[in-house]
Image (cartoon, grey):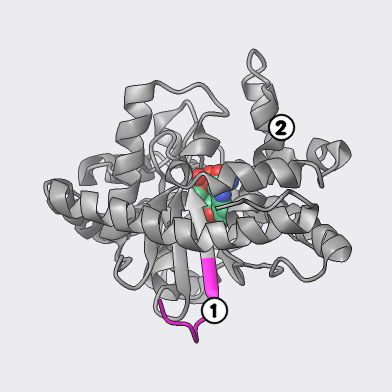
Amino acid sequence: MDGTKKTLFSGMQATGKLTLGNYLGALRNWVTLSEEYNCFYCVVDEHSITVRQDPAELRKRARALLTLYLAAGIDPEKNCIYYQSHVSAHAELAWILNCFTYMGELQRMTQFKDKAAKHADNINAGLFTYPVLMAADILLFQADLVPVGIDQMQHLEITRDIAQRFNGIYGDVFTIPEAYIGKSGAKIMSLQEPEKKMSKSDENPNASIYLLDDPDTIMRKFKRAVTDSEGSICYRDEQPGIKNLIDIYSACTSKAPKDVEAEFSGRGYGEFKEAVGETVVSVLKPLQDRIEELSKDKTYLDTVIKNGAQRAEYVATKTLRKVQKKVGFPERIR
Ligand code: TYM
């Protein structure tokens, strides 16, 4: 890796089917930033088990996610792609940071409140301390920048608070990370309930565009997308359905929302929905083709997985050892 570049860290959970929100809010930016930074892109499989998973399914999804990172265009020679569970330093640092995080801080996390409501029969301690593991992910790599969608901002803020608290006691151990939120696509909403974010755990399949949806399904879902009775294509909060479609179109074409408004001024919703659907198909189809191609190359994927784990472990262990020393753990005798 290039020692003159700054460091970037980000990750995605290997749960559920990934959505257009994951792509436009995060993955797309990961690719753009990957030339400028030394990047660590992690498949956060340890976070996934805060909700019950089928083991075989989790393994399959984790591999599919790693393949997606590659298919999106991240070069594993220049950047590091790996599984969180392959680097034990994540869990070890998370334990230490748990002792520097307050219950009150974690109780305020909206993702915890949402997930606890959704999985009332399994409000486990891991779900509660989930943000601490996320802080460990980021701080282990001394990341300067963390590209995420808006829904992860609160977790980024707690990461910064934990790092600052730790540094306040022990000196400058951790780099304080900055969030990177893309100009467009940072909060893609549900196609059926545009007041809610598009989520892989939504029970209504029409609410989300999944990255592996075929073109017909994508077109059908956009045709059914909930809009309003205003009849004008305007980017405003009073028209959340249309606003979301403009956001999607704008993120896929890199056009500003006001230019999208101008492009479709005086045209009907049906025509606009079709244009958005076609644009999304043109973005996702090449990605799907590349996933299919890469999935066949087992040897290549295994090499990426092996090298990624080694490289990530080397960097993460350096930070972990420093932290262990700072908090007073005895040195190893070799
Ligand atoms: P996860 O797996 O829920 O989502 C992965 C990324 O996709 C973004 N995202 C969205 N962006 C725009 N619109 C949406 N509808 C949408 N839905 C999801 C998320 O903001 C995220 O960037 N806790 C994290 C995973 C994680 C992580 C980390 C991220 C673990 N450790 C360290 C960054 C750094 C999560 O559950 O993301």
Q: Is residue 95 left or right of residue 199?
A: right
Checking the image for residue 128, the label placed there is 2
- Would you say the magenta stretch is mainly helix, strand or loop? loop
Q: How much space separates mark 1 and mark 2, taking CA atoms?
A: 31 Å
Q: Is residue 54 magenta?
A: no
Dot 1 or dot 2: first in sequence order is: 1
Q: Position of residue 85 (x, y in %)?
A: 46, 41
The residue located at (51%, 37%) in the rendering is: 46
What range is drawn magenta here?
1-8
Residue 265 visible in the displayed image: no
The residue located at (82%, 47%) in the rendering is: 100
Give the residue number, with chain letter if any, for mark 1.
6
Checking the image for residue 271, the label placed there is none
Q: Position of residue 298 (x, y in %)?
A: 15, 46
The residue located at (47%, 51%) in the rendering is: 21
Q: Position of residue 310 (x, y in %)?
A: 38, 56
CB atoms of marks 1 and 2 within 8 Å: no
Dot 1 falls on a residue whose secondary structure is: loop
